[in-house]
Every structure is written in structure tokens, then in C-alpha cells.
Amino acid sequence: MLLVALTLAAYAPALQAGFIWDDDSYVTANPTLQTLDGLRRIWLEPGAVPQYYPLTFTSFWIEHHLWGLQPLGYHLTNVLLHTLNALLLWLVLVRLRVPGAWVAAALFALHPMQVESVAWVCERKNVLSGMFALSAILVWPRFLPAAVLFGCALLSKSVTCSLPAVLLLIVWWQQGAIDRRTAWRVVPLFVVGLGMASVTIWMEEHHVGAAGEEWALSLVERALVAGRALWFYPRKFLWPGALTFMYPRWSVDARVWWQYLFPAAAVAVIVVLHVARRKIGRGPLVATLYYAGSLTPALGFFNVFPMRYSFVADHFAYLPMIGLAALASAGGSDVVQRLSLEGRRLGYGACAVVLLVLSLLTAHQCGIYRDLHSLWTDTLAKNPDCWMAHNNLGAMLVKEGAVDDGIAHLTQALLLKPNNPEAENDLAVAFDMQGQHDDAITHYMQALRLNPDYPNAHYNLADTLRTLGKTDDAIVHYLRALRLKPRYPEAHNSLGLALAGQRKFEEAIAHYTEALRLNPEYPEAYYNLGNAFRAQGKVEDAITPYAAALRLRPGYAEVHNNLGAALAAQGRTADARAHLEQALRLKPNYAEAHFNLGAMLIGERRLGEATAHFMAGLETRPEYAEAHKTLGSLLVEQGRGAEAIAQFEAALQLKPDDAEARQQLDRLR
């Protein structure tokens, strides 16, 4: 009860947090969470989600259908899973007769390094896989339940592939040897674990993007990274100061002699513990090997995306920390038991103080994950040369409309890391928002020179070219983006717009349909699909996608307008009027809605109301010659000839060859 209470109290601030980096691709902008077919894709289409962790994404799918995109539910689940993991760890260590088992579980639960795995929604994969992995250890040596739980752990996050080695370590620790029967029972687990690890490695390189210059390390350089990382986490465990979301990326140089000291010292520790095992027992060696082995997937031997900006991260140590916590608690327990009664009391008091301090640090650390502003500003305060944080903060500020501030951070990102295609792309987006399209194109092209296979830059450049009327060039880049990233609903939708602009409606409809297959809750694609049907004269076909768009976004004024016009064309005037009036409630200066409603009122011979709507529409869109001509005709019917003359003259100024407007004007004169 105390362990649960302390953990829940320490992580209470995380319940007030929102979504942060990568939570969009995992949750908030993940279309697979929205439908039953999306659940099928999570399990059967590797690449439909950022990584093949189907149990993790299934948990998100369930939550999305329970409470939508309310972050509280997702954070509460993470906190409860972490609390359960602390309890499971306590039970495991008690069963293994590790001294100080409760303290080890408390250190695991309350250490601020764990905040990244708990307060960051997309790290559900850590806490969920941890629950299954610890449960598998708890039920071992019962093979079938342990194997099922191990499979669930792998399907949550394949970093748990080291679990079979952990089971062998436990057997060796307890029995002093590994019998043949145990070894053969673990073989299938090793095979499955390596298979899932291989899938993750492939996905990291080919889907997530962990390939390129930042990952071009030799085997010796990777060993140097691993040696340094092995010492990084114990240091942070003992002194958790300046914990940050992104640590500085070390400069690795195989020619620098002192960098070899880290891996050499790590090997030396293991050798010493092995030699001393008869005197101090096998426990310290097992705990150390568990720590190093569990950390192996994140030591730099395999490409993972975070290596681009740092070789270490707090969430890498979520399960490996168990080894450190067990070592610390068992060692402390041994020391305390040798003390006098008064000394033991002081030892217990010191332990309580340590846990209290860790709880307070954890609660404070949770605040960093409150939102993206807090995350990136804290990262830059502790790691001011982090180009990725500058880049992401800049892109976020641009998206929020603080374009100048965003450009400043993006420029700094390029100063810290020249030849950075992401910063070039994001800077181009900022210039686009300021209407500086030529500058934007320059930066998009630079991004593509640096990385010709950058789908987002192709897509953004295509959007700019389409805005400038260079539709053929835009289509080339849309197609290139889709070749690089076939599951790109936004590119399909925008390509559809470009094709529709060329009146290639069937091709446009095909791309809108594909966009909706990839993201069934994409209101803009439904709207554009309806427009394409309507442009073909298929008014009845247009009504269904318009209705779908409004189901997803009831406040979509443009859809209300176009649906109203489609219903009016079918003679359903009551429904049409309701949608056109709703469009105007949502967007009072919406010229097209005024014109459409006015045209419908003309058919009902409500000329005064129709006149008012055409006048209101022309205030917003005075360059529409046809509306001036229609208004002129309305005024003539109402005997307002002088006003009508002004409207026909305006129509002819905009469209001098309009014979009907010329005839009406001559008649009035």
C-alpha cells in the first residue's frame, strides 16, 4: 500500500500533462486508432504505425474508443502500469530472495529517470512491455504462461528480447549451473526474441528513418559509444541532476585514447565481479550482467532514431534500472544489517529521506512533460546546443503563428547543424506562411538537395507550387512524395486537388479515396471528394462524402455551403436552406454561401431577401461579375433601376464581353 501510495503521489503531476513529441504519430494523428479496420492494420500491416508494437497500439486503440483524445486517460494508464510494475518487481525480488526487495522496487518506482517512460504517452511501450516481462519472470519456470507473457512483452516492445538471457541468469544465480533441460526450454524464446528484434531493427532503418550519416559508425566507434553509455546511467542513477529529454550527443573518435577507458572499465568490472563471485556471491555479477544485457538494444550497436541527436535517453534505462536498484538496495541492506540497532535506525531513516527526495524530484520532473513548450524550453535550458530541440521548437512556434520566433530557432538549428534538411524544410514552411513563396521554394530545394528522398519536403514544395499555379510541377513532387511514402493521406488529398484543378476528376477521386482508406476520419478529403463528384454533375454521389465530413467536423462552413448547394440542385430546399444558413452562422462573411442562399431565394420569389444576400456577398467578393449581373436583374425586378445600372456597369468592368449585362444596361439607359 505504501509503495502504491508513494508512486501515485509522485506521478500525480503527470496526470495534468498533455501530448508531446511523437504522441501525434502514436495517438493524436494516428488514423489506425479510429476504426475496426485500423485495428486490423495495426496487427497485419507493418508500417501502418511507426513501429510493429501491436499490443501497445491496441491499447491506444481501446483508449481512443473509450475517451477519444483526452490525455488524462492515457497518462493515468501509464501511471497505473508503472505502479503495477513496481509491485511485480517487488514480488519477483521477494521470490528471488533479494535483500532489500521493497527498497529496490521503490527505487525503480520513484527514481526521476523513470519519468520519461511514464509521463510520455508514446512510451506506453516501455511500461506495457515491462508489465508482461516482469510477469513472465514471476511465473517462470512454468513454460507456457511464461512464453505467452514473453510474446506479449515482445508485441509491446521488442527491447524485451533479452528476457530469455535474464531467465538463464536467474537459474545460474540460484543453482550455480544451467541444466540442459532449462537451456533447451529457453531456445524457442531466444528464436522468437531475435525474430522480433530483427523486425524492429528493419523498421527503424527503413520506416522510422534511422539510416544516414548520423548512424555511419564503425564497429569500434559503436563499442566506444556502448562503453560510455554503460557508465552514463549509473551516474544519473546515483545523482539524478540535470535530467533532460535530449542529452548532448557525444563526439566519438576512435583516435582518442581516453574514450577506450569506458568500455575497458565496464569489462573490468564484470571480470572482477566474476573472479570475486566465490567471496561475495553471484548476485552482484548477475545484477550487473542483467543491467548491461537489458541495455544492449540501446547501446548503439543497432541503429535507433534517437542516435541522431543523442546516444542516451532516460527511457532507454526503464527496465535496465532494475539491476541498478537491486544492487543498491541489496548492498545497502547488507551494510545496514551489520550495524548496531541505532545504526540500523539511522540507515532506515536515510533510506526514507532518499525515497522522499526522489519522489519530490520525480514530481518536479513530471512538469517538464506537461506540454511541448515546457519540454523544448527545458531541453534548451539544459542542452542549449541541441539542434533538434531548436528545430522542433521553431516548427511548433511557426505552426502556432509565432513565425518570427520560429524562424529564429530554425536558423539557430541550421547554425548548430548545417546541411540539416528538416530545418530547411521547416524554415521553408515558415516563409510560406509569411507569403514569401520564392524564399520558401529556395529552402525546399535545399532540403531536397541534402536529402532527395525526403517525402515531406516534396509534399510541401508541391503545395507551394500548386498555390503559385504551377500545377504540373506540383504533381511531379506529389508523386515523388507518394513513391517515397505510399501511406501519406495528405499527399493523396493534395494530389487530388491538383488533378481536379486540371479537370481530371476520375484520377482525383481515386486519390481522395486512397487518402480516406489510409485515414477514414479525414474531413478535408471527404469535402474534396464531394466537390469532385459535384463537378462531374454527380450531385447525389456528392452528398454522402459531404455528410461524412460534417460528421467529423460539424463546424466545417465550406461543407455546409456546398452540401446546401447540392441539396438545392435536387430541389430539397428546406434542407439546403438549413445548411446554407448554418454556413453563414459559422462564417458570416462567406460570399459563396450568400450567393447560393440568394439564388435559392430567387427561385422561391423572395426577392428582397435574395437581394440582401447578394449585396452581402459582394461586400466580401466584389470581383465576382456574375453576382453583380444577378443583383442587377433582381434590382430591375424590384423597380430599382438606378441601383441596377451600377451593378451592370460593375459586371461589365469585370467582364467587358458579357453580352447579357450590356443588353440589360442599354435597356435601362
Image (cartoon, helix red, strand yellow):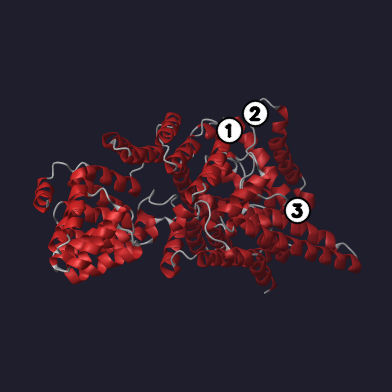
Q: Residue 252, image x and y in percent?
A: 64, 32
Badge 2: few (under 14), some or many (20 or more) residues near its Cα, within 10 Å?
some
Residue that badge 2 annotates:
253
Closer-to-camera residue (389/75): 389
**Badge 1 element:** helix
Q: Answer with left or right where residue 613 lies relative to residue 68.
A: left
Residue that badge 3 annotates:
281
Badge 3: few (under 14), some or many (20 or more) residues near its Cα, within 10 Å?
few
* Residue 585 visible in rendering: yes
Distance of mark 1 from mark 2, alpha carbons? Answer: 22 Å
* Amino acid found under the numbered disc labelled 3: Gly
At x 64%, y 38%, the residue is: 385
What residue occupies the far bottom of the structure in this picture?
1
Residue that badge 1 annotates:
415
Figure check: 270 above or below 221: below
* Disc ID at residue 197: none
Figure check: 312 above or below 513: above
* Amino acid found under the numbered disc labelled 1: Leu
Mark before the other along the chain sequence, 1 or 2: 2
At x 33%, y 49%, the residue is: 489
Closer-to-camera residue (451/281): 451
Closer-to-camera residue (243/440): 440
